[in-house]
Amino acid sequence: MTPKAEAVTQDSKDEEAINRQETRLALKRFGRKRWNLIPILQKVQARLGYLPREAMVEIAAYLGIPEIDVYGVVTFYNQFRLNPPGKHSIRVCLGTACHMKGGYITLDAWKRRLDINSGETTADREFDLDTVACVGCCTMAPVTVVDNQPEGKVEPTKVDGILLAFELVREAEKKEAKQ
Amino acid sequence: MKTISLKIDGKQITAREGDNLLWVALDNGIYIPNLCAIRDKPEPMAACRLCFVEMSGQTQPVTACTETVTEGMEVNTRGTEALRLARRGFELLMASNRVDCAHCVRSGSCELQKIAHHLGTKLKSKRLRELRRDLPVDNSHPQIRYDPNRCVLCGRCVWVCQEHLKTGALGFAYRGFERVVTTFKDEPLATTRCDQCLKCVEVCPTGALLPKEKARAEARLRA
């Protein structure tokens, strides 16, 4: 194993241990009843930002229910995340107006550029991609909400533009850090 | 428990009061289409919408799996309205199912074929656009081949798995059209706590869960 790969595995192991500990702490306030599952999931997600595998395993063991049942609930509700939040959130609107104006094409452009699927986070945890049903500014369709800021008429070329803007900011920050 | 008598399709039947109508009919040789019914389950799922019957005292058809038998009850399992509803439910169910009986080893013992025959419909409706899900087949398990594309989400395997293992390996996940019978984190079946009891394969009404040797025979059929 290369030193870099080793460092990455060590990092993910540390993160897993922290996640487990955080989950156990969150669980303390709840009774071991099945109906506490959703409040527990909400609490754990509030602490960790998402619901990692190890957290779901801990919760299932605590409540004495099958792990798949926890997974079933997590995948059923939109409020639960299976991937860590990225530094920047990308929300592609697929409401009626955005759908008609090619929201799916915009989503595909994001998927291609970030190389992730909807509901996932890039490996460097810079971006997470998801869809929303409607953000209420249909005249600007197709809309993408970037870090809570709605962007209008997001054609694939604009996707490139938005990503380029982030890239420039990052480079400027790097330069500043060097000085 | 009190014994009562009722009539199903004109046939006089005696049953115990409070028994489930669907099982009373099936036990007396009267077939009512069903997929999600599980005898030991206290609460019926009533999800498949196939067991519609017409009943005395009811203006609308009802699902047999959610009814209990009462004295003097008269049930018609072949009512036009009930069959219309069941056919429609079946049509919708099959619109997202990969029908390929020619290459399926369950052809002939498949519950879906039996239901289509009973309802007098085809397996595939021409009216509805086919919405295929194209999910990956799980071939990891040494004894089981799981093809979610042939699954009708009846939940029988989920029930036996959880009954047998207590903390089962199989369960439902995702919502709406994406709903699927799967494992924790969608991991391969081989890596789960499955202890190879193969009860899920026994109860599967379709070719979704097959024992490996049958799956291999099917692969030869396809070749």
Image: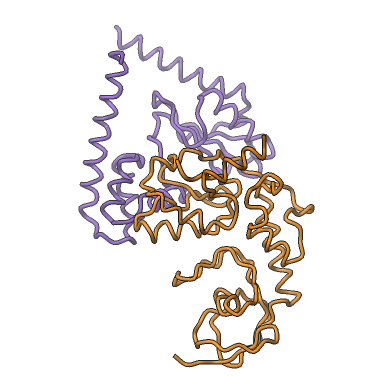
Residue displayed at 34% across by 55% down:
B167
Is A4 on the left-hand or right-hand side of B57? left
Q: From the viewer's side, name the closer residue of B89 and B193.
A: B193
Q: From the viewer's side, name the closer residue of B53 and A175.
A: B53
Quarter occupied by residue B94: bottom right
Q: From the viewer's side, name the closer residue of A173 and B98.
A: B98
Chain in purple?
A
How far from the left and from the top, in percent, is residue B11? 67, 86
Quarter occupied by residue A173: top left
Is B99 on the left-hand or right-hand side of A65? right
Residue displayed at 72% across by 55% down:
B123
Residue placed furthest toward the top: A179
Is A169 on the left-hand or right-hand side of B135? left
Residue displayed at 30% across by 22% down:
A8
Whether B66 is drawn above or below B212: the answer is: below
Chain in orange?
B
Report how many numbered discs are placed on residues in the image.
Answer: 0
Quarter occupied by residue A140: top right
Residue placed furthest toward the right: B126
How far from the left and from the top, in percent, is residue B122? 76, 57
How far from the left and from the top, in percent, is residue A50? 36, 40
Specify the quadrant that holds the N terminus of chain A: top left
Q: From the viewer's side, name the closer residue of A124 and A34.
A: A34
Whether A126 is drawn above or below B58: the answer is: above
How far from the left and from the top, in percent, is residue A37? 34, 56
Specify the quadrant that holds the C terminus of chain A: top left
